[in-house]
Image (cartoon, helix red, strand yellow):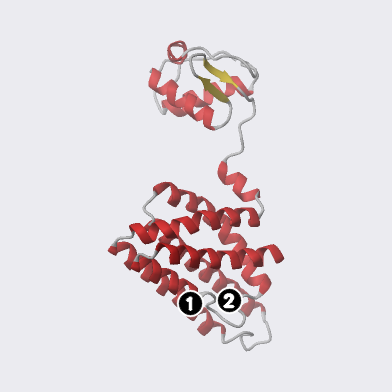
């Protein structure tokens, strides 16, 4: 399929799509050196900067690779699986091991870098976690809900578990945000949907809130206090212990 001049907008996306089609369609097999930026820009009717951004996108998809002094070469004809998709199919224990490593260090950084606004956000998130637990406990009428496990009670319990997990993740996100590293925050944001889905299932499967609607409250309060007073070692140790305990539950589930 020959290349052709592109429409005005959006040029980078169009250039990326056209070049990807050439690669995945077999026009440029693996090992092929692509035409230079000037040649591609002329053929596509765009500027060199647009071609350069398109090649970066293709490199990110694992289709091409730039070799210093040699040019850009096709290294695959099938795009690499994107990060969110890879996370969705990963074992939750694998995801959690990475979370443990990332968040432990994030807690240490948060203690060293937190601002007054961060401390306020952490304290607010801790209250929200407690409110989610208290609201669920009040609405459920106790462990059985007083109705012998009706469908409505089960639905209420599932909703309560989801609200509690959401509040828990929000508190952890506030700790990561206090680390003042946008890459860490983005990484946690990628983990969050996968964590949420599996944690809700875990809470329900193991009945982790059957006897205590707010499990881990003391540890989370200690974490917030450690970050607030700037104690990096304590913050890291507390969060590591809390996540390691959950990981142990996941490994047994």
Cα separation between marks 1 and 2: 25 Å
Q: Position of residue 110 (x, y in %)?
A: 39, 59
Rendered view: 186 above or below 23: below
Say which element carries label 2.
helix
Q: Which mark is residue 5?
A: none
Q: Quadrant of residue 212?
A: bottom right
**Residue at 60 percent of width and 53 percent of height:** 95
Residue 208 as seen in the image, left or right of residue 229: right
- Whether residue 128 appears in this view of the structure is no
Pointer 1 residue: 218
Front label number (1 vs 2): 1
**Residue at 60 percent of width and 55 percent of height:** 97
Q: Quadrant of residue 116?
A: bottom left
Q: Quadrant of residue 194?
A: bottom right
Residue 137 as seen in the image, left or right of residue 178: right
Q: Which mark is residue 156?
A: 2
Question: Dot 1, how many residues are within 10 Å of its Cα: few (below 14), some (14-19), or many (20+)?
Answer: few
Circles 1 and 2: CB distance less than 8 Å?
Answer: no
**Residue at 63 percent of width and 17 percent of height:** 31
Rendered view: 125 above or below 17: below
Q: Position of residue 53 (x, y in %)?
A: 43, 26
Q: Position of residue 94 (x, y in %)?
A: 64, 53
């Amino acid at each position: 399929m020959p290349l052709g001049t592109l429409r005005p907008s959006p040029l980078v996306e169009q250039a990326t799509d056209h070049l990807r089609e050439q690669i995945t369609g077999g026009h440029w097999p693996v090992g092929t050196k692509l035409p230079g930026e000037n040649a591609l820009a002329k053929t596509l009717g765009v500027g060199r900067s647009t071609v350069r951004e398109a090649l970066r996108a293709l490199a990110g998809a694992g289709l091409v690779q730039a070799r210093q002094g040699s040019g850009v070469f096709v290294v695959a004809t099938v795009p690499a699986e994107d990060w969110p998709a890879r996370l969705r199919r990963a074992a939750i224990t694998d995801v959690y091991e990475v979370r443990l490593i990332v968040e432990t260090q994030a807690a240490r950084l948060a203690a060293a870098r937190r601002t007054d606004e961060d401390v306020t956000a952490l304290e607010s998130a801790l209250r929200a976690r407690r409110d989610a637990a208290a609201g669920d406990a009040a609405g459920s009428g106790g462990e059985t809900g007083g109705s012998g496990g009706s469908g409505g009670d089960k639905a209420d319990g599932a909703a309560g578990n989801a609200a509690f997990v959401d509040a828990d993740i929000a508190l952890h996100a506030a700790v990561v945000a206090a680390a003042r590293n946008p890459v860490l925050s983005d990484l946690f944001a990628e983990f969050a949907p996968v964590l949420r889905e599996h944690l809700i299932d875990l809470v329900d499967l193991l009945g982790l809130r059957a006897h205590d609607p707010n499990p881990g409250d003391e540890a989370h309060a200690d974490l917030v206090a450690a970050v607030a007073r700037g104690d990096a070692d304590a913050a890291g140790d507390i969060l590591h212990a809390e996540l390691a305990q959950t990981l142990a539950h996941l490994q047994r589930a």
